[in-house]
Image: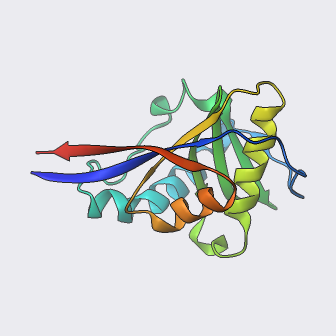
């Protein structure tokens, strides 16, 4: 049996100065590129934690119910990254590996905070695997605090 910890994190602050990026809502034409980036971003973690399938997305039908809440950041015709905003929850913040380490993760996070703050003042939540230390540090640097640790056990 394998187990790993997931942090439930919360942000109760205000909106901040908006980052210098603009995002567009996901549409089906972007799915092949989105699937590749998403799977690449989470593959190493899912494999290390033995969360199968390691490549989560394998068809747009898996995304249809979530698509209207996913926003994409582009460099020309290339997706740099993406973030999902579901009510007061941020989910699936990803940055293409070729663009990591350049501040795009922070910009996507700040964009999502500002976007959610435009329609609610409820605490903003997200989940991060303890294994993904870089993501946890990013979220904490933006003002998120760990409110709960959940242990997930897989057989």
Q: Nearer the viewer, residue 41 or 16?
A: 16
Observer-nearest residue: 53 or 36? 53
Q: Is residue 78 visible?
A: no
Q: Residue 128: x and y, percent?
A: 46, 51
Look at 85% across and 49% down and name the residue there: 16
Number of callouts in the render? Answer: 0
Which residue is drawn at the image coordinates 43% and 57% (left, top)? 42
- Image spot of residue 83 (x, y percent): 65, 46
The color scheme shown is rainbow
| Image: 31 above or below 98 | above
Q: Residue at x 52, y 60 (%)?
A: 136
* Left or right, 51 with reference to 138: left
Classify the position of the C terminus by image quarter.
top left
Residue 91: x percent and y percent?
A: 56, 41
Q: Would residue 72 be found to the left or right of residue 42 on screen?
A: right
Query: Which residue is at a point 65% across and 32% down the rendered structure image?
Result: 123
Residue 55 seen in the current view: yes
Vertical comparison of 88 with 130: above or below: above
Position above or below: 136 against 71: below
Locate residue 8, reporting x and y percent.
46, 42
Q: Is residue 43 left or right of residue 38?
A: left
**1 left or right, relative to 53:** left
């Amino acid at each position: 049996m394998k187990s790993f910890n997931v942090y439930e994190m919360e942000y109760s602050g205000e909106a901040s100065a908006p980052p210098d990026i603009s995002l567009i809502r996901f549409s089906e034409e972007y799915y092949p590129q989105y699937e590749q980036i998403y799977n690449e971003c989470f593959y190493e973690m899912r494999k290390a934690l033995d969360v199968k399938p390691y490549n989560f997305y394998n068809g747009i039908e898996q995304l249809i119910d979530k698509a209207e809440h996913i926003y994409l950041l582009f460099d020309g015709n290339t997706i740099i990254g993406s973030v999902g905003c579901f009510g007061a929850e941020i989910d699936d913040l990803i940055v293409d590996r070729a663009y990591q380490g350049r501040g795009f993760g922070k910009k996507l996070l700040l964009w999502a905070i500002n976007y959610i703050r435009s329609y609610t003042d409820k605490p903003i939540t997200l989940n991060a695997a303890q294994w993904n230390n870089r993501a946890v540090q990013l979220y904490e640097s933006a003002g998120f605090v760990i409110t709960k640790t959940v242990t997930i056990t897989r057989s």
